[in-house]
Image (cartoon, rainbow, N blue to C red):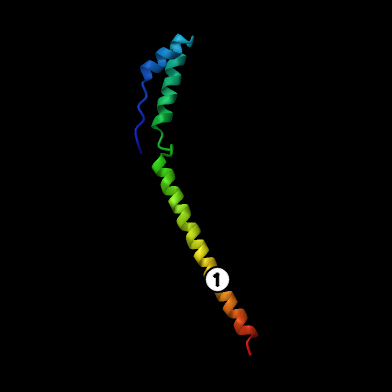
Amino acid sequence: MTATTFDTLEFVKTLEAKGFKKDQAEGLSDAMKQAFNSSDIATRNDIKVMIQDAELRIIRWNIGTVFAAAGLAAAIVKMISP
């Protein structure tokens, strides 16, 4: 997972310039910093791996379906053949 740079001091200064009280600005800054540092955020690579995994599952499902259909067809042919 890649690190995200977050300038908390600049963020606090910007909020204060917009009328936030210092403790409010610092609280928001802390919350944003925690959100950026959370390990629950998916990166592009995480999403790429999930898509590849889903594609592999779909391919396996399709192969299994083809074999099941072929087995069913063979059973039907065997049943109706003299």
Q: Is residue 6 above or below residue 59?
A: above
Determine the residue positioned at 48% across, 11% down: 20
Number of numbered markers: 1
Residue 26 image offset from top left, x and y in percent: 42, 17
Identify the residue under disc 1: 68
Q: Nearer the viewer, residue 7 or 62?
A: 62
Q: Residues within 10 Å of mark 1 (few under 14, many from 20)?
A: few
Foreground of the two, 81 or 36: 81
Element type where label 1 sits in the image: helix
In this view, 6 is above or below 79 = above
- Whether residue 61 is situated above or below residue 3 in the rendered picture: below
Residue 71, horizontal then vertical, whole percent: 55, 75
Residue 16, horizontal then vertical, whole percent: 44, 10
Q: Nearer the viewer, residue 27 or 2?
A: 2
The residue at the far right in this view is 80
Residue at 45% over, 14% down: 15
Q: Position of residue 8 (x, y in %)?
A: 37, 20
Residue at figure coordinates x 40%, y 26% from the top left:
33
* Residue occupying the point 41% across, 30% down: 36
Q: Quadrant of the N terminus?
A: top left
In the displayed structure, does residue 65 sit left or right of residue 22?
Answer: right
Quadrant location of the C terminus?
bottom right
Name the kind of residue labelled 1 in the image.
Ala
